[in-house]
Image (cartoon, rainbow, N blue to C red):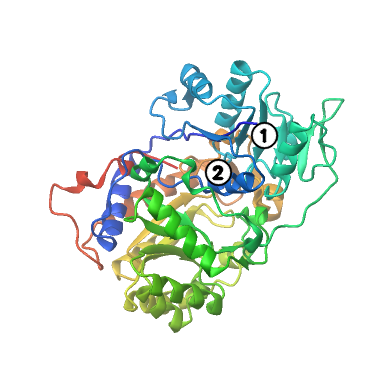
Amino acid sequence: MRVAFVHTPMSTVPVPQRQGFWQNFDIQYHAAYPGLRHMKNNMWELPHWMLWLAGVLVARDFTDLGVVDLYTEPNAFSAPGTMASDIVEAAVRAQPADVYLFSPMTVNLCYAYEIADAVKRVLPGAVVVFGGVAATPLAHEVAAHPSVDYVVVERGEQALPALLDALAAGGDVSDVGHLVHRGPDGAPVRTSRRYRDLAPAEIPFPKVDLFPSGTGEDIRYLRQVYALGCPYKCTFCTIQTIGRRPDYFPLDRVRDEIRAYREHYGNHHNIYWGDETFTLHPEHTLELLEMLEQEGGINYDCQTRLNCLTDERILHKLRSSGCQWVEIGLETGVQESHETHKHHMKLGAVKDTLKKVRDAGLAACAFTVNGFPDQSPDDMRRSIDWVCGLIAEDLLQATYLFGLVPYPGSAMFEQPERFGMTLLHRDFRLYHEDLPPVFTTARATPDEAYAVFLEGLGLFAQAMDKPPYFGAAPAPGTAAAYGTFWADAHV
C-alpha cells in the first residue's frame, strides 16, 4: 500500500503594511543570528506532522511513502485564493498512491478540499483521509465532504495505522477508533472505540528523510518538541488536540532527533522548540538545557509564557545552552483581557521579567494579538502603544501582530456568546490573521478592529526600526539580502 502525505499550500493575503513590518522584524531576528541563511523556497519549516506520522507508519511496516508538496509549488495558485487545477492534478499524478493524508489548518481547509477533489478525479479509487487541528473539531463537517473518506480525530498514532490495516484487509473500519466517516445512510458517524494517548517515549522515531536533503535550503529552522501538552486554557487556543497534562520525551530521544534532522537537512540549522510553554517545568527544562549545553553547537529559539520565566537558573541556562531568541505570549496590554482569556498572566511583572531576560543575554519577541472581544478600539490602541513602549526600552527586540481568530476547537468558536462575540459566518477561507475579524462585538465592529490592526502594523514597523540591542543591523542598502520571505504577506 502506497501512502502519500499532502502538504497543503497557503494563499497569501496582500497587506501592504506587512512589508515594512516584516523587514524590520527580520533585521532584528538576523541580528540575533548572524550568518543565518536565507530560504531558497519559502517552506519556513518542515511539516512536522508528516515526519512524525511517517515514523509511526514505518514502525507498522507501511514503508512505501511519498509527499505531494504543493506548499512550495510556485504555480499552485493561478491568482490569490484560486488554485490552478492543472498544477494540482499534475502533482497528484506525479505521486500516485492508494491513500492520501491531509492535515490542513483552518484557513487552508478549502484548498485541502480542492486537492482531495483532484485526487478523486485523477485516481477515483484512492482513499482520502483528513486529520489534525482543524479536522478534529470539524470532524463531522469534514467527513461530509464528498471527496473525504475518513477523518481521524485527536491524535493519530494508533488510529491511522489501524485504519490502514483495515483498508488493506478489505475495508471494515468498524473496530478502528478515533474515526469519523459516512455511514450507510450517508450521514457522518464516529466509531465507538477510543485509544489511550501514547506517552512520548512510546511514539516511534520520526522518518527524518521523508523529504530530500535539499529541502534544507527551503527552511529557516528545524522544529523540535520535547513535551506534549499544555495545562493552560487560553480561550483562543486549540491545544485540545494534544491534551492538557504535559508529558516529556526522553532526553536521548530528543538529542538523537536533533542530530538526525541536522545531519539530513544541514548542520547549520537552528532549532525552534515548538513547545508552547518551553520553560513550564523548571526541573525538566534544566535537564534538557544541560543536555543541549553538553551537545554544543546548537542555537535555538523557544516560546513560553511570562509567568514561566521567573526562575533565574532557567534564564542563565537558556543562554549558555544556545538560546538566542525567546518568544513570549504577551498578547495584550489589558489586564482584564488576560483575566478572561489567558490565565495566570499579571502585567505588573512584565518589565521586571523582560529586563531579567534581556540581562541574561536573550533577545525577546512578543506575540501580540489585536481584537479581543472585551476591548474597544481605544483599548486595542493602548495595548499596541504599550508593546511599542517595551520595544523602545529595549525590553523587547521585536513583536508579531496577529488579528484574533476564533479557530474551530477554541472556546471562542465553541461558545462565542460567552465572550460577547457574534460569529458572522463559517467561511473558513476568511479565518485569517491578516484579514478583518470574522466576528463582531458590542465594543468594536470588524472594520473598527481591523483599522487598529493596520495601524498597529505601521506602529510596530516604526518601533522595530532601530539599532538592534543584540548584534548589528545590516549595512545600508543590503536589507534585500535577507531573502524573499518577508517581502510579501504571509500566514
Look at the image and tell me in which quarter the C terminus lies: top left
Residue at 61% in and 16% down: 121
Q: Any mark on residue 50, and which?
A: 2
Q: Secondary structure at mark 1?
A: strand
Q: Is residue 402 left or right of residue 357?
A: right
Q: Nearer the viewer, residue 174 or 17?
A: 174
Residue at 50% in and 45% down: 47
Mark 1 sits on what residue? 129
Q: Is residue 63 left or right of residue 169?
A: left
Q: Any mark on residue 165, and which?
A: none
Q: Secondary structure at mark 2?
A: helix
Residue at 43% in and 53% down: 261
Look at the image and tell me in which quarter the N terminus lies: top right
User: Compared with residue 219, is residue 124 higher up or lower down, i.e. above or below?
Assistant: above
Number of numbered discs on residues: 2
Residue at 61% in and 50% down: 442
Q: Earlier in the sequence, mark 1 or mark 2?
A: 2
Point out residue 292 in the picture as x, y percentages from the top left corner: 42, 70
